[in-house]
Image (spheres, grey):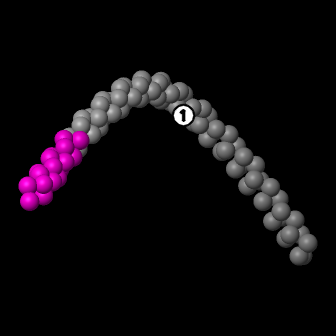
Amino acid sequence: MRAITCKKKKEKKKEKKKKKKKKKKKKKKKKKKKKKKKKKKKKKKKKKKKKKKKKKKKKKKKKKKKKKKKKKKKKKKKKKKKKKKKKKKKKKKK
């Protein structure tokens, strides 16, 4: 009796597997429609590359501002040299 019941259970499992395979084929048709939408997004990426070229022109303007600061430091050194010459004249009079 046990051998007969085991055979019946195996036959029922085979029938269930055949029904599942038929349902999976219908889902594959829906995936093909999603692939067409991805091609439209690639056209938008080409427009972003043109904006990067404009940023390079702004870097050249910053270099000119650094040269003006160096000229101000040289004027302060000339004032210190004039004070030292006055002290030497007083010693000669004595």
Picture layout, residue 16 above or below residue 70: below
Q: Is residue 77 left or right of residue 30?
A: left
Residue 26 position, x and y percent, is: 63, 39
Q: Nearer the viewer, residue 53 or 47?
A: 53
Q: Which residue is mark 1?
A: 34
In magenta, the rendered stretch is: 74-94
Picture layout, residue 58 above or below residue 25: above
- Asked whether residue 46 is in view, the answer is yes
Residue count near mark 1 (Cα–Cα under 10 Å), binned few <14, some 14–19, many ≥20 = few
- Is the N terminus in the top left, top right, bottom left or bottom right quadrant? bottom right
Image quadrant assignment for residue 32: top right
Q: Look at the magenta stretch and give its main secondary structure.
A: helix
Residue 35 is covered by the magenta coloring: no
Seen at 54% across and 34% down, the residue is 34
Q: Is residue 36 left or right of residue 48?
A: right
Q: Nearer the viewer, residue 92 or 82?
A: 92
Q: Is residue 13 left or right of residue 88?
A: right
Amino acid type, residue under disc 1 in the picture: Lys
The residue sitting at the bottom extreme is 2
Seen at 35% across and 29% down, the residue is 60
Q: Nearer the viewer, residue 12 or 34?
A: 34
Q: Nearer the viewer, residue 30 or 8?
A: 30
Residue 92 is covered by the magenta coloring: yes
Seen at 61% across and 41% down, the residue is 27
Image quadrant assignment for residue 25: top right
Q: Secondary structure at mark 1?
A: helix
Residue 94 position, x and y percent, is: 8, 59
Residue 16 position, x and y percent, is: 73, 55
Image quadrant assignment for residue 58: top left
